[in-house]
Image (cartoon, rainbow, N blue to C red):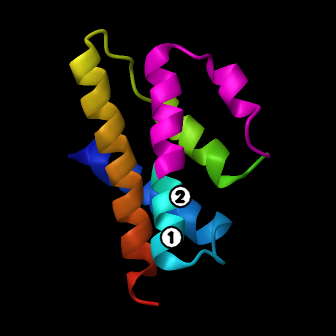
């Protein structure tokens, strides 16, 4: 439970500092899809060095990459797919909660 809380806090901090101009629904969906793509690459064994080159320094993309690579890789395909879906949904939920009150 502590890990989820720390991850959620990191997500909220990233959203509040790097994505202030996002429109709620469409942008949260875009962030969720970005998180899914990054975690998919993580689970397929793409190096973090390569993934860090995708976004600019301090970008939301970079924050998502770091978050994804703080987690291990799964060997079983079903476990990989479950973690990818959960990671996507965690980022969507944090984004939605951040902008829900706007």
Q: Are marks 1 and 2 in contact (CB under 8 Å)?
A: yes
State whether residue 81 is above or below residue 4: above
Q: CA distance from mark 1 to mark 2?
A: 6 Å
**Which residue, given by chain and number where applicable, does mark 2 sit on?**
30
Residue 85 lies in quadrant: top left
Residue 20 lies in quadrant: bottom right
| Overall secondary structure of the magenta section | helix
Residue 36 lies in quadrant: top left
Residue range (magenta): 33-56
Furthest residue to the top?
75
**Which residue, given by chain and number where applicable, does mark 1 sit on?**
26
Q: Camera-side residue: 94 or 4? A: 94
Question: Which residue is rendered at x = 36% and y = 42% of the image?
Answer: 87
Local SS, label 1: helix
Question: Which residue is rendered at x = 43% and y = 74% of the image?
Answer: 98
Residue 64 picture location, percent across and down: 55, 44
| Residue 56 visible in the displayed image | yes
Question: Which residue is rendered at x = 74% and y = 43% of the image?
Answer: 55
Left or right, 24 with respect to 4, comes to right
User: Does the stretch in magenta take in 42?
Assistant: yes
Question: Which residue is rendered at x = 60% and y = 46% of the image?
Answer: 63
């Amino acid at each position: 439970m502590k890990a989820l809380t720390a991850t959620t806090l990191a997500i909220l901090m990233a959203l509040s500092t790097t994505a202030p101009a996002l429109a709620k629904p469409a942008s949260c969906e875009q962030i969720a899809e970005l998180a899914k793509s990054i975690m998919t690459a993580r689970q397929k064994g793409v190096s973090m060095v390569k993934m860090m080159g995708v976004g600019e320094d301090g970008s939301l993309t970079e924050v998502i990459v770091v978050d994804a690579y703080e987690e291990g890789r799964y060997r079983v395909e079903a476990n990989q797919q479950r973690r990818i879906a959960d990671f996507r949904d965690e980022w969507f939920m944090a984004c939605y909660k951040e902008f829900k009150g706007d």
